Amino acid sequence: MNKKYLRNTFLVGTSLSFLSAATLADVSLSGSTQFHYVNQDPGSSTSGASNDYFDSESVVDFIFTNKLDSGLTIQMNQTLKSRNQNTTSTFGSDGANVSIQGGFGTITLGEQAGIGDSLSPTAADLIGPGSTDAKAPSFYSSSGSLTSQQASLINIIDTENSITYTLPKIGGLTLGASYKDAGSGTSNNDDETVLAGSYEFTSGDVSGSIVYANNSIDGATTGAGGLNSTSLGLTITSGPISAIIAQAEDDQSTSIHTEVNDYGISYAVSDELTIAVTGTEVTESSGGETLDVTSVAVKYTIANGLDSYLTYHDYDYGAGNSGATADDGSATLFSLEATF
């Protein structure tokens, strides 16, 4: 038989086998895009600065799922994110990992948000994309020691190469652990271990969850002190009312400690309209810095998959003896979010 014919037959057969295996996978494609107009009125404004800017972000999620005859589910996840804040544009991967799920639980390997990031709540969750996360401007001086405006787990494994194991859910209890190896160099000994648990409960018309998370970071070099972060949050929902109370503590260094407390409540006036109010208090030990933020947000659903938000933040940053610049001001955000 002609060798060329044999080779072509083998290649075609191999390709058809590959395509047949590929068709077994369920493919999910979803995305979202946000546009924000941010107007800040700082108490210590720079002369001539407009203090307003545009911020936009688009996210695309690809999920490939294979359910095997053995009962295992294998899933590949890839997230792409583009961001344009003010005049700075970024584009790249915001998560690329594989997960294996079975009766033993779920193991996730690769670039991902750790268990602490996915479980720990903050009152800012009630506000939406106009909250005190990266969409809003920072209300404190970058020359100080404050690093957070939210009471979720502060030091987190965030879109980094890591391993996460989540146990099978037992009733309302979810437990998991994440581990990140910082690297192989002499100054890369700061590996991270995150432990987190969530308990969901229901009592009559009231439902909610209690979440605890801890992140332990080893010293970066031999003999160096380690760092620790903890987060505790309570979420309660009853009819149209939802409330969150959260507290986080963080060692930024062996001598700098930050504590964040936040609380908030939201009320669904109708299927289209929701109003939320939150408060956040941050204190830092070494320089005596403080931050108080009160936020009010209104969410209105324009159509299925299209939401608008109007958010107002009033903040007061005290520099203490840190040498940074104190600031007492406000910020207003108009946000539009479309999901697909």
Image (tube, rainbow, N blue to C red):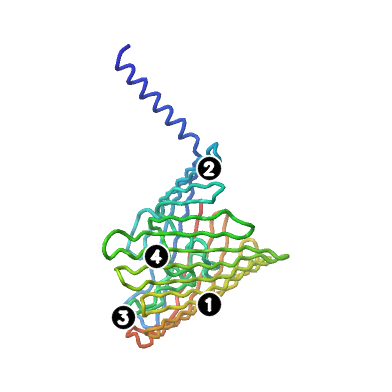
Q: Are marks 4 and 2 in contact (CB under 8 Å)?
A: no
Residue 279: x, y in percent? 53, 77
Tag 4 secondary structure: strand
Disc 1 versus disc 2: distance between alpha carbons?
44 Å
Q: Are marks 3 and 4 in contact (CB under 8 Å)?
A: no
Q: Earlier in the sequence, mark 1 or mark 4?
A: 4
Q: Residue at x 64, y 57 (%)?
A: 171
Q: Earlier in the sequence, mark 4 or mark 2?
A: 4
Query: Which residue carries the number 4 mark?
Result: 54
Q: Are marks 3 and 1 in contact (CB under 8 Å)?
A: no
Which residue is at the front of the view, 219 or 239? 219
Q: Residue 253's quadrant in the figure?
A: bottom left
Disc 3 versus disc 4: distance between alpha carbons?
20 Å
Query: Which residue carries the number 2 mark?
Result: 72
User: What amino acid is labelled 2 in the image?
Assistant: Leu
Residue 107: x, y in percent? 48, 51
Q: Earlier in the sequence, mark 3 or mark 4?
A: 3
Q: Residue 209's quadrant in the figure?
A: bottom right
Given this view, does label 3 or label 1 mark the residue nearer the observer?
A: 1
